Structure formats: C-alpha cells, structure tokens
Image: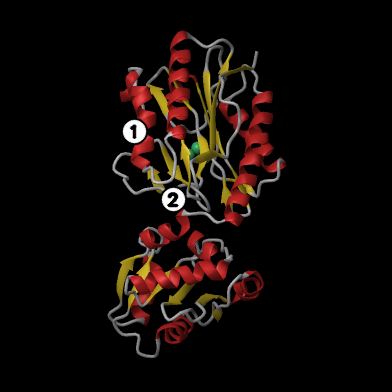
Amino acid sequence: MHPRRLQRLIEALRDQQLDGLALMPDANLAYLSGLSFHPGKRLTLALVSADGAPPCLVLPALEHGRAQAATHIPMRYFPWHDAEGSTTALAAAVAAAFGLNAHGRVLAVEYTAMRVMELRALEAAIPDLRTRDATPLLADLRMVKDAAELAAIEQAVRIVESALERTIAQIRLGMTERQVSRLCSEAILAAGAEGESFENIVAAGPNAANPHHSNSDRPLQPGDLVILDCGARYQGYISDITRTVAIGEPGETARRIYDLVLRANEAGRAAARPGASGAAIDAAARAVIEQGGYGEYFIHRTGHGFGLETHEPPNIVAGNDEPLRPGTTFTVEPGIYLPGVTGARIEDDVVITADGARSLTTFGRELRIVGE
Ligand code: CO
Ligand code: CO
C-alpha cells in the first residue's frame, strides 16, 4: 500500500521537474512511510529523490531502531547522536539522495510545516538550494483516500458516534461546558480511540454563537442550545462531527435556526457527487440559510477535507472550483451564529462515491432535548 503511495509521489515530482522532496516528520511522512514522530527540536528530515531510490531519513539515533521496525517502505537511515550533531548525517544523506554535487538542486519542501532550523540546515548542505512549495502536490496525493484509509476513517466515525451518544445521555442542567467536555473526552477514549482529533468544543447558550469557542465554566441553562463538536483518531485517521442539542424546550429563534441549519446540511450533502466542486456544495448549503434570512450569520466555509489531519484540502467554499473525485473525504458543517444570543451547527463526514456521496456519520440529526 505505502510503496504505491511513494511511487505516485515520485511520478508527481518528475512531472513537476523537481529533483526531490524534503519532508518534515509530519502527516505527509506518515502517509508515505507509516512513520510518526513526536515533533521535537532534533533535526529529523526525510529526503526523497525523484530517481526513485529509497528515501534517506536523517534522524536522532535514539529513534533509529523504532523507525526501522515501523516503516512500511524501504528506507536508508542517517542517524546522528547529540554529541556530534546532525550536520555530518545530513551531508551524507544529501549525497546519497542527490549525489556528491547537489549544487542548485530544486527541492519541494512543506512551506507551512518546515521551520527555519530545517531550511537553514538544508541550505548549508546544498549550495544554491532552490525550493518549491510541496504543499499542493502532497495535498493532491492525499485527497483521494484508498480502501484502507476509508476503513480507518469509518472506524474513527463509529467511535466518536458512540462516544457522542454516551456524552449526550449524561448531560444535565447545571453542568458546565468543561464538565461536558471532560465526559466527551473520556467517552472517546473509552470507545477505543487513540486520542481526540482535536480539543472538543462544548459551546452553550450565547457561547454557541462563537464557532471557535473555548470551553468555559458557564453552567448549562434551560433553553440553551449546546454545540458539541468532537472527533476520534483511529489508526492515525480522524473523524469530526458536530451535533447541537437543546437543554429543555428551546425558544422560537433557536428552533428556527436549527431547522435552517439542518436543511442546509441536507442540501450540502445532497449536492456532493463526483465532479461537483467545493464551491457548488458550499453554495447549495448556503442558499438554504440565505433564503431563510440568516445568510450573514453563516460566517464560515461549509466544510473541509480531513483524513490524517483534521483540516486538509479540499475546502468546501466559494472559489474552489476543482471537481471532487471519488474517495475524497470532507465535512459538511453549516452553522448559524447570532452574536450574544445562540448558535447551531450540524457537521457530517462525507465521502464522494462512484455515483454520488455517502455520509459516514449517521448520528441522528433531529433536535434532541436533553438534560431535564
Ligand atoms: Co468539527
Ligand atoms: Co470540521
């Protein structure tokens, strides 16, 4: 599985006339090799040459054995010890990957991930290094998920859905957002997740008007809408779901915005099919909320891709006219946010199929009244 991913990468490097790629120890390296590292200050870089030879991995010596045991692809190792530093190991890896005279090579690097430390080290090892942004190339490789990736995502969805069910069943009037958040975290781990996809969001009452709310000690009150946004990680892959529940009987405005958000979510999912663009799906969801008179309160994109990371291409947003391909996974998560009053969001995880789209999340979307 992973050797084929590496082969596709090498073809993409050749298409773009790049000499190679330098990868940080991040999700892209995990995608290609199965290797994951804790981000640290010790230089760790994978060099992939467009010539197709096994990648060269510069890494702290203390990680060497673990990397050899865990990799899914052939790899050449260049370990270094703290006492000697990484310069010699990097020079040897550069020579192995790009030849003894690597002068002026054109390498793709991850502009949003590589730090000055790694860039300076590469510049020192490769005179007149030229760099291009690897981000779009790698995003394109990762956008369409294979069967093994989809199986992991589906399990991540099952885990978070059972955890969400358990959390909602425990919500009581007077609990704080932080207490509910803790219940949710525990339920996600208890259901078999490797961890949470991100810090869950519990936003109640007026706090629900803030899509990026930080959980607070405000107690849940009668009539609150509560936005619960959470995810589970399984075999490296994440899920990302949002449901909005009501504490006791919601008011008329809360009902109205919830119903609009629900219809917008349905319209967004219905617009998803092979060849549809992120812009078209966004427009379908947004039209429902605009026609309902709340367009100015839907203040974010309709969704985002996800997989190894919570936010990946494609963006489900105006301006993204790229046709979506079968196997692409993304969220549909319209919301309405009334500042100082309330808010609602319903988020599903969707995959484009051969002839349409399927929601991986199946958790009920009707407004649930809880905590009484
Ligand atoms: Co979410
Ligand atoms: Co999301």
User: Would residue 112 be found to the left or right of residue 176 on screen?
Assistant: left
Write down the quadrant of residue 127 in the picture: bottom left
For the residues bearing labels 1 and 2, Cβ distance under 8 angstroms:
no
Label at residue 325 = 2
User: Would residue 233 be found to the left or right of residue 344 on screen?
Assistant: right
Q: Secondary structure at mark 1?
A: helix
Asked whether residue 65 appears in the rendered view, the answer is yes
> Badge 1, how many Cα within 10 Å: few under 14, some, many 20+?
many
User: Would residue 53 be found to the left or right of residue 338 on screen?
Assistant: right
- Dot 1 amino acid type: Ala
Residue beneath disc 1: 283
Residue at x-position 37% and y-position 31%: 284
Depth order, front residue of 326/153: 326
Q: Position of residue 90 (x, y in %)?
A: 45, 80
Write down the quadrant of residue 202 in the picture: top right
Residue at the limit of the structure toward the bottom, as seen here: 100
Please report whichever mark, 1 or 2, sits nearer to the chain's N-terminal start.
Answer: 1
Can you tell me whether the CB of the residue at mark 2 lies under 8 Å from the nearest atom of ligand 2?
no
Q: Position of residue 317 (x, y in %)?
A: 35, 40
Label at residue 56 = none
Colour scheme of this structure image? secondary structure
- Dot 2 amino acid type: Arg
Quadrant of the frame with the N terminus = bottom right
Write down the quadrant of residue 232 in the picture: top right
Asked whether residue 80 appears in the rendered view, the answer is no
